[in-house]
Image (cartoon, grey):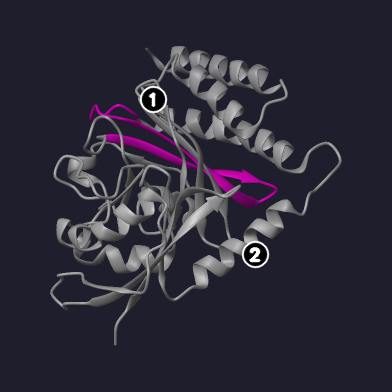
Amino acid sequence: MDTSDRLRVGLGVLRSVSRALARPLDVAGAVRAAHAEMARVLDVTICFFGLYDAPGQIVEVVWQVHDGTELPGGHFPLGSGLTSQAIREGQPKLIRQWSKEGPSVQVQYATDRPGLPESSIAVPVVFDAEIIGVLVVQSYQAEAYDEDDVALVQGVADQLALAVAADRHGPEGSSDAPARGSDLEAVLASMPDALLVLDDKGRLVRLNQAARRLLCLADKTLILGHPVDLPQADHWPLGTRQLTDQLRPVFDQLRRGDEPRGEVQVSLNDPMDHLLSCRASVLLKDGAPVGGLMVLREVA
């Protein structure tokens, strides 16, 4: 398409998104509707939207899709990757061919197709001069996007910002719920110990900044949304098989809903031979186990 045709198509998508978001939708519903409209003109095989908590420096992925299948969300702390760059700098980011120019990846989500995408656009979602989230679209094809596509995705993100703000605050004005959530995130972010949260299927769904720093030593990649004791294409959710094997008894107890007793000492098997102690507890909801909490601390 020539420039005028692309402009006409892009404006059509933005109008369609605007009409879709005129309905009362929660955040996930709004992103789902925007994704459907973007799919008319872009390869959005992978798409996710994350809410950003500035005090805690945490991104909560509230909706994501891979090849037509919606995936569970999760929480991850800011790092140095593409998504984090878009938030920190408040500017859209474009990767045309990840295998040649993409930054290293410390945290990724599990999908049925292991491996990284080749093309990616990450744009900040801004409301009232505050970054409240991030919208990311990705493709397995190299050179799938250009600067015009970045402008289109940013335009969609700008409309999503209004929907997110409306869902957060409601018609009666601002709510203190986000503030209470920020207090919790700030506490978790400031913890010196590494915190890992597993769901009822043993999948890593949350980690704090200390966990990211500790487990990503030597350029390791963590995988959210995948059972921590199983590999995905030779990659382990906690970075290495050696660490996983040492913690396997803890994973087994948590999966059974049994409370692990005492501390377990493990080694990262990194060049510095870091030794860690691990304590774990079962997470309960209405008296039933729904996952586990693990705290890793370096042994002096």
Q: Is residue 281 left or right of residue 227?
A: right
Which residue reaches farthest bottom?
300
Residue type at numbered disc 2: Asp
Residue type at numbered disc 1: Val
The residue tagged 2 is 183
Q: Which residues are magenta?
A: 119-145
Determine if the magenta segment contains residue 127: yes
The residue positioned 35% from the left and 62% from the top of the image is 212
Mark 1: few/some/many CA within 10 Å (<14, 14-19, 20+): many
Residue 43 place in picture, x, y as percent: 36, 22
- For the C terminus, give its image quadrant: bottom left
> Where on the picture, by quarter, is residue 181?
bottom right
Q: Secondary structure at mark 2?
A: helix
The residue tagged 1 is 44
Which circle's residue, 1 or 2, is located before the other in the chain?
A: 1
> Where on the picture, by quarter, is residue 165?
top right
